[in-house]
Image (cartoon, rainbow, N blue to C red):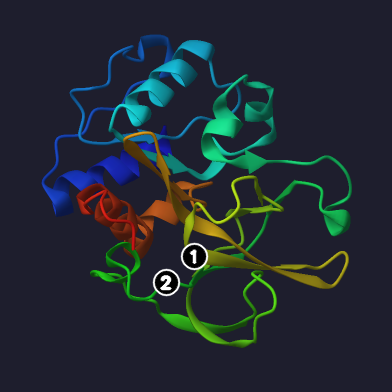
Amino acid sequence: MPQMKVLAKFLRENGRLSVAITDQSSFPKDLSAYNAVIVFIHGDLQENTENSIINYTKKGGKLICLHHSISSKKAQNKHYFDFLGIQLDNGPMEKGGYKWKESSWSLVNLNSKHFITNFDVNWEEKVSYTPSDSPSSKRAYPCINLKHNSEVFINHKFTDGREKVVLCGIVYHDKESDKTYMQDRGAWIKRQGKGTILYFMPGHTASDYENKNISQMILNAIRWPARPIS
């Protein structure tokens, strides 16, 4: 768990938080004692874990889903994608099919007045971006550029209309097709039951969380009050 060790160190040192790391084999059934639960699971999401995090969130918990918490393996789960309001389609990327790409990409700040994206976060660069909430106009937005060995997901599809509050978008240029993808899917918030889900796409490598601005947003998400969403 090199990624989570980096993130946990940041949360302890900068947030003065008590952090425990566990795997699915020893995952607690009852999560009610935790102020927030961070999910970082590559591959299969076991049914007992799925049930625990859903129950925890709906009863008022704060669930923070990182990177491959949304991936094709999780589409096999019975309730998880409906819980998130997400759909991943098969097929070519250029026709809307879900794909992952190990590459450099940019996380774009689309909600610069929000506490999560603003407090102690340095958006170092700017990028020309057209929000995928059409019709929209292109302009320069603050961004964080992630290194070539990071990973971006294309064509995460929302199934819950406008229930989510979008925080960040993504920009990825596909060299094979020479097409640039701009999608409002880099980070978002969703109310679920009495609780809250927050998703952040960065995290394929430990270097993503070594970028203190990425880790700071996750710390901000833990500190941010769940109500109201704004």
| Dot 2: element | loop
Relative to 208, is 117 above or below? Answer: below
- How many numbered marks are there? 2
Q: Earlier in the sequence, mark 2 or mark 1?
A: 2
Relative to 223, is 21 above or below? Answer: above
- Which labelled disc corresponds to residue 198? none
- Horizontal side of 112 relative to 31 (left or right) equals right
Where's the N terminus, which quadrant?
top left
- Horizontal side of 95 relative to 98 (left or right) equals right
Q: Quadrant of residue 3?
A: top left
Q: Residues within 10 Å of mark 2 (few under 14, many from 20)?
A: some
The residue labelled by disc 2 is: 111
Contact, mark 2 vs mark 1 (Cβ under 8 Å): yes
Where's the C terminus, which quadrant?
bottom left
Residue depicted at 57% across the width and 23% down the height: 79
Q: Nearer the viewer, residue 91 or 24?
A: 91
Q: Position of residue 108 (x, y in %)?
A: 51, 71
| Dot 1: element | strand
Q: Position of residue 219 (x, y in %)?
A: 26, 52
Q: CA distance from mark 2 to mark 1?
A: 7 Å
Q: Position of residue 203 (x, y in %)?
A: 48, 48
Type of amino acid at the residue the image marks with label 1: Cys
- Horizontal side of 189 relative to 134 (left or right) equals left
Relative to 221, is 29 above or below? Answer: above
The residue labelled by disc 1 is: 168
Type of amino acid at the residue the image marks with label 2: Asn
Residue depicted at 29% across the width and 52% down the height: 221
Q: Residues within 10 Å of mark 1 (few under 14, many from 20)?
A: many
Residue depicted at 88% across the width and 44% down the height: 91
Q: Quadrant of residue 210?
A: bottom left
Q: Position of residue 78 (x, y in %)?
A: 62, 19
